[in-house]
Image (cartoon, grey):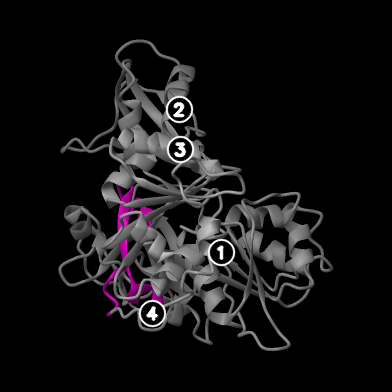
Amino acid sequence: MIEAFQKLGCLMSIKMHFLFSHMEKFPENPWGDERRAGRKVSIRTCAKWRRGTRGEEVCRQLRDSDASLVVHDDATQKVVEAAISLLQKPLRRITNTDASPPAGVPSLRSLLQDSSLPLADPVEVIGTETALIPYSSGTTGNSKGVDVPHKALTSNVAMFSHPSFSSAKASTETHQDCFLCYLPLFHVYALLPIMMVGLHSGVKIVTVPKFNANAYVPQIIKHKVSVLHTVPPVLNFLTQSPDVTPESMASVQSVLCGAAPVSLSSAETFTQKVDRPIFFQEAYGMTEVLISHANPLNATRLGSCGKTLPNIKVKVVDIETGESLPANHEGELCFMSPSRMTGYINNEAATRETIDADGWVHSGDIVYYDADANFTIVDRCKELIKVKALQVAPSELEEVILQYPKVKEVGVVGVPHDLLGEAPRAYVVTSSPATEKEIQEFLAPRVAPYKQLAGGVAFISELPKNASGKILRRQLKKL
């Protein structure tokens, strides 16, 4: 495939931006292409796609990452074309399609099936080179490109594959574990514990475009899923579904739940429905350090995200003084890890806010640990809203809503939501009378569906602020 890239004019470093409706080809592309690259071409991948993503959002990422090539499929073609139009500069494309590709756009499948291209050539890296640029809102603010080096990925795979933590068994002639992945592969949860650890252990990985409530349990049965990866909203579904029985879950040996705090009652209800001993594992991570915590095997502590993975240093600090705190005291979780990011691309200020002068990565999450060093996530001191485990930056929504002529000020916070876990709600100060419908309709075409104001719109006379003019979001949540 590298020869094909060279024909496209990509002779030096390539940054590929992947936009697939579901990224079943993602494992082949970033690492397959790097193996084929030899010493001539360095592949940097920038993976970012959520159903409903708008052209404006993709354009910002393309501009920020300075991508040379976009790889997309039929479902994302219109978004890509809109983004390139907004970018106002030519950008090479490759499409993954069963139909005839647009004129001048090569077919990914044809390139992968071309037997004249070498399968793999060895490539030497020292580990600091960029491997991936996933986009994250970080600990606060708008979406930022996270520079993830090769050494971060390889070290994190080794950490999570440690026999004390990984429930996936290495494949043999008589045994092969099976994972079922409905999560987007740009998310660190799908990227590390599912895709990379799965490939490392020789696991069969079944990917589906999205979670389907009617198909989920039948898929588990059909593929004999042995390690079930889930998130809190889906765990809640499993606890309520009549399809979940000891018989339908017979192949499941362990469950990994992450991406958001896990409800203790949901975890207990699910294990009771299975009606046999099963390992229920919670894990914690963030794009900037990948996976950092998990329950050790056979040491389930429901409600806790477990212990720190090997080779990672952590501390819990007072959010006001920065002083390290002892056990059972709540504070901000900080990391020092070989799996951390290099920084946010093109954003030194945000990097300095997240990685301090001593090299500690500040998570923005409030936690505590007990006498046995088991960690529990309490709350977020960062401002991000988690909608079904997807991050929404209040400042991004505020920036858009402020463009509506009748809006004078706006503050966005997350509020509890039965289906979404958390949903954005806007508190609006207007300069002239406006309705919630007006605000919702103005926002709808400008951001992705999961960023919509599912928590509603409330009109107030003024926003609570501190002396420096910063919105006091905790007070907004109390209104």
Q: Which residues are magenta?
A: 126-154
- Tell me what residue is drawn at x 47 percent, y 20 percent: 436
Residue wearing tag 1: 113
Q: How many numbered marks have been drawn onto this rendered protein structure?
A: 4
Circle 4 residues within 10 Å: few <14, some 14–19, many ≥20 = some
Query: From this viewpoint, which residue is outermost toward the top?
Result: 432
Can you tell which quarter of the image residue 86 is in?
Answer: top left
Residues at marks 1 and 4 touching, judged by CB atoms closer than 8 Å: no
Secondary structure beneath label 4: helix
Judge by depth and name the residue closer to the eye, 89 or 209.
89
Is residue 256 something that shows in the picture?
Answer: yes
Q: Is residue 100 magenta?
A: no
Residue wearing tag 4: 155
Residue wearing tag 3: 79
Q: Give the x, y percent position of residue 125.
A: 30, 78
- Tell me what residue is drawn at x 50 percent, y 66 percent: 28
Mark closer to the chain start, 1 or 4: 1
In this view, the mark in front (1 or 4): 1
Q: Which mark is residue 445?
A: 2
Distance, label 3 to label 1, CA atoms, is: 26 Å
Q: Which mark is residue 375?
A: none
Secondary structure beneath label 1: helix
Q: Amino acid at mark 1?
A: Gln
